[in-house]
Amino acid sequence: MTAFEFGRSFGSNLTRGQVVVVSRDEDPETCELASGVISGLRSIGATVEYLAVVSRALLRTVTRSAQGRVHVHVGARSMTIRC
């Protein structure tokens, strides 16, 4: 599954115009993945707020009113997208 497909799939549970906040960690590779997720979300009509580089803890704290949250993270062994 591509990042774009993930974004479309995640957003398919939302109604048009609902807000999804996307963030990523500081690894340069996550920038491309986050862009793909954002493109997928926007393609189905979601409103995307991109926070760029923030920690998952901060994402949870500042986005309580959003209908969805996605954080792109590179771990020691693999790259993950967390919701």
Image (spheres, rainbow, N blue to C red):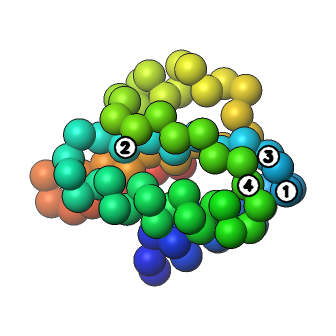
For the residues marked 3 and 2, what is the alpha-carbon distance in whole angstroms?
A: 20 Å
CB contact under 8 Å: marks 3 and 4: yes
Residue at 23%, 40% in the rendered image: 26
Task: Please name whichever residue, 17 or 61, is drawn nearer the observer in this view of the structure.
Answer: 17
CB contact under 8 Å: marks 1 and 3: yes
* Crowd rating for badge 2 (residues with CA inside 10 Å; few <14, some 14–19, many 20+): many
CB contact under 8 Å: marks 4 and 1: yes
Query: In the displayed structure, would residue 29 be above or below residue 59?
Result: below
Residue at 64%, 61% in the rendered image: 41
Residue at 68%, 69% in the rendered image: 43
Q: Which mark is residue 46?
A: 4
Find numbered disc 4 in the image and state the secondary structure of the residue it sits on: loop
Amino acid type at mark 2: Arg
> Given the current orientation, which residue lies at the most extreme bottom position?
1
Amino acid type at mark 4: Ala
Q: Is residue 78 left or right of residue 57?
A: left
For the residues marked 1 and 3, what is the alpha-carbon distance in whole angstroms?
A: 6 Å
Q: Which mark is residue 24?
A: 2
Q: Which mark is residue 18?
A: 3
Residue at 20%, 51% in the rendered image: 28
Q: Which mark is residue 34?
A: none
Closer to the chain start, of discs 3 and 4, is 3
For the residues marked 2 and 4, what is the alpha-carbon distance in whole angstroms?
A: 18 Å
Task: Please name whichever residue, 42 or 1, is drawn nearer the observer in this view of the structure.
Answer: 42
Q: Residue at label 1?
A: 16
Closer to the chain start, of discs 4 and 1, is 1
| Image location (x, y in percent) of residue 42 | 66, 61
Amino acid type at mark 3: Gln
